[in-house]
Image: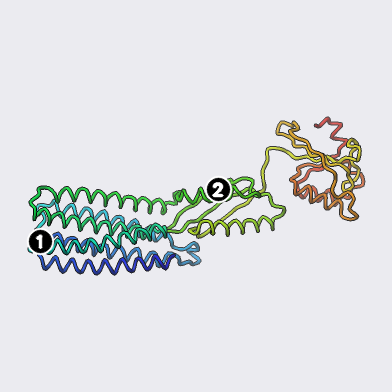
Amino acid sequence: MELQKRRWMVASTLLNTLLAGAKLGWGILSGSTVVLADAIHSLSDVIGALLVYGAVRVAPHRSARFPLGLYKLEDMAAVMGGMGVLFAGYEILRSVFSDKGVAAPSIPVATLGFMVIVLLVQGLFYYLEKRAAQALHSPGLNSDVINWLGDLGAGLVVMAGISGHLLGVPFAQEAAVITITGLIFYSAYEVIRDGLLSLLDASTADEELEQARKYLESLPLVDRVQSLRIRRAGSALFLSATLELEPQSFSQAHRMVDEISDELKREIPRLESVTIHYEPVTSDRQRRLSLFEADRKTPASAFGRAHWLRLDEISEQGNIKSQQWFINPYREDEHGKAMKLTGWLVRNRIDEVRFEPKGTPAPLIELLAILGIQVDKMNESLQRNDP
């Protein structure tokens, strides 16, 4: 992508230099001050194109001081190029409405034909570069496209002056100047606005933002997208997001984030960098597990050998919102019942476990505490009339 932008900027600069030289030579030959002014305007565009090309060339460079690259140089160049277009529009107005007015060329018909050829070449390149700028999402190329629009406007002003001189139409040149410079000023405003928004880290790229949000919300293990931002620097996008995930472990969460980042870059090729922070799923309910013997009434006396598991979801007001019963899936295992059931508690985000921990090893109680799972004696809870 960067190579394509550089090639377009080189082609634009070479063509603009060639046309500026041709207009300068013709202006001297014909004695037309308007053609000479247009040549000077084209030379200013050459300087602007070189500025943007240099920014595009340097933008991907990274260093310890600039780890994200120098993409905003492209926006700075675009703003400066837009300012140059505004000044060129002013110069066009000044040249037409000054006291001296516009001097007619000594060979008006030939000058008119020369300007038609110049406009055809400029128009073709303007159309092709505009398509490339849209495809590459490059503010630098967009700025150069606006410069070519300014050249077309200046050329039309020249043709209007010559045609008005030949046909004797009053105020034709003035009307053309007002219309074209208005278009130039508006286009320059858009370039300057977009460049400044990027330099100020305004939230842009709404289409890509919505695309990223839809993808993230479609993932089954993403419970919620807490925040999502995309900022633009030059033609590159930088995404940052905070997600609530339901991973079974930190290593799984890390793998998930890597996979999500890679997929986002495939979905949105303009993404230069993806930064994702993940947090465990938050809930306004407490999940409490009570362990029972086979009769569903007697509190289990051994953690790993409990027969029934009752899962209660408790609201903030202390009311039971839902209740489910499960058979202990590890009760018949020969080894590791307690550790396997502990893993089950973690996977199901249990906040509190109730049973009668007679003879339960102290390390297991400590492990549950480390995992953030509160241990409560079933009989004591019943005595307190807890729900």
According to the image, label 2 marks what residue?
Answer: 214
Residue 84 in percent (x, y) is at: 27, 57
Give, as a three-letter code, the residue at label 2: Lys
Task: Tell which circle, 2 or 1, labels the residue nearer the N-terminal end.
Answer: 1
Residue 378 in percent (x, y) is at: 86, 37
Check disc 1: other Cα within 10 Å, few if <14, some if 14-19, many if 20+: some
Quadrant assignment for the C terminus:
top right
Question: Is 129 or 60 nearer to us in this picture?
Answer: 129
Q: What is the secondary structure assignment of the residue under circle 1?
A: helix
Residue 160 in percent (x, y) is at: 15, 54
Residue 363 in percent (x, y) is at: 85, 52
Q: What is the secondary structure assignment of the residue under circle 2?
A: helix
According to the image, label 1 marks what residue?
Answer: 108
Quadrant assignment for the N terminus:
bottom left
What's the mark number on residue 183? none
Q: Residue at x 39, y 61 (%)?
A: 73
Question: Is 294 or 188 nearer to us in this picture?
Answer: 294
Q: Is 171 on the left or on the right of 69, as rendered?
A: left
Question: Is 269 or 354 nearer to us in this picture?
Answer: 269
Q: Residue at x 67, y 55 (%)?
A: 253
Give, as a three-letter code, the residue at label 1: Pro
Check disc 2: other Cα within 10 Å, few if <14, some if 14-19, many if 20+: few
In this picture the colour scheme is rainbow
Q: Is residue 231 above or below residue 6?
A: above
Q: Quadrant of residue 118?
A: bottom left
Q: Residue at x 18, y 50 (%)?
A: 176
Q: Is 322 on the left or on the right of 236, as rendered?
A: right
